[in-house]
Image (tube, rainbow, N blue to C red):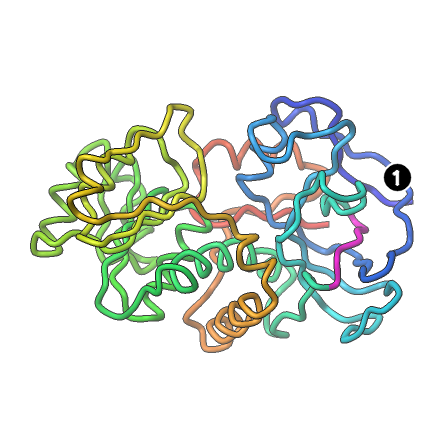
Amino acid sequence: MARVVRFYETGGPEVLRIEEVAVPPPGKGEVQIRVRALGLNRGEVMFRTGQYVPTPRSPSRPGYEAAGTVVALGEGVQGFAIGDAVSVIPGFDTNDYDLCYGLYGDLANAPARLVTHHPAALSWVEAAAVWMQYLTAYGALIDIARLTSGETVVIPAASSSVGLAAIQIANRVGAIPVALTRSASKRPALLDAGAALVIATEEQDLVREVLGMTGGEGARVVFDPVGGPAVEKLVKAMATFGILLLYGALSPAPTPLPLTHLQPNSQTIRGYRVTEVTNDPARLDRAKRFINGGLADGSLRPIIARKFPLEQIVEAHRYLESNQQIGKVVVTV
């Protein structure tokens, strides 16, 4: 029997329950992992509250991202051995497979194609904080937008783990990261994290600030997890031929399509999910090389906001939803 986290109805953090459940042996193409740490993600909050794709079924076991040791191998799995230290790359929908694919708990199965060795220097907490944030940011900024040296990228919700990863990736390729945050309270931390400019959107005019720092040209890339009415301002802050990659829907309000600005400036708004990269072996391999290279040379460094034990999974989710954090929230097992 293993301890796993499940929920039977959508709702607040209090719907999460720790239960004793029999986890089946790994099937064909699967790896079974003794989990040491879990990375929490905003998508799991949306899944728990019924605002995500797919719709939860009852009971649902959440969890996309974990690090631990291999304890069993399914048929046909190669490249791993019992005892290997590994991480799980987010790339599956928790309701698309058997419930054992949720990673919240101390034992979990995962598809071998999404399991990877991580640099030995990483702690379990750091290893659990790597793949969702860096892979999401890499896929949008490097794989799709082809961000290069000297280009400006605007990053809303910059204090999130993905936002911080985007700042680090932009700096790694010589681009100029502009961090957006609602108030100035997080400005020092974002500057310390590598932002070239921090704009407090409730206190400053983001369009004027971005145009001012770019000599009136605007940013070629915007990497937005929020959507909603702010998209109109983000488009106005973009350069001609600029691209806005929308990878989340944190705003409860509808997202406008500002054609009067998009069309004359030949700009693009594009939806994006990390599975674009994880479902393509060649693209995933390139991403792994880029991210592991950055971890090895120190240009990519997970920032941990706070750690919670598994027994405090409800409190961990409450903290994640508080928006107080700067960096990744990790649960230790």
Using the rendered view, name the quadrant where residue 271 is placed: top left
Left/right placement of residue 300 relative to residue 235 reads right
For the N terminus, the image quarter is top right
> Would residue 110 be counted in the magenta stretch?
yes
Which segment is the magenta one? 106-112
Residue shown at 29% from the left, 39% from the top: 185
Relative to 73, is 68 on the left or the right?
left
Q: How many marks?
A: 1
Vertical placement of 89 versus 204: above or below?
below
Residue drawn at point x = 53 percent, y = 39 percent: 42
Q: At 35% from the left edge and 65% from the top edge, which residue is drawn? A: 146
Main structural element of the magenta stretch: helix, strand or loop? Answer: strand
Q: Residue at x 35, y 30 (%)?
A: 255
Residue 263 vertical placement versus 229 (above, below): below
- The residue beneath circle 1 is 21
Q: Position of residue 214 (x, y in %)?
A: 13, 56
On whether residue 289 falls in the magenta region, the answer is no
Residue 294: % across, % down: 46, 72
Label 1: which secondary element: strand
Mark 1 burial class by Cα count in 10 Å: few <14, some 14-19, many 20+: some
Residue 23 at x, y = what percent?
A: 88, 46
The answer to which of 192 and 294 lies nearer the viewer is: 294
In front of the other: 19 or 144: 144
The residue type indicated by label 1 comes to Val
Q: Seen in the image, is 213 located left or right of residue 230? A: left
- Expressed as whole percent of the image width and height from the top left, the position of residue 94 reads 69, 42
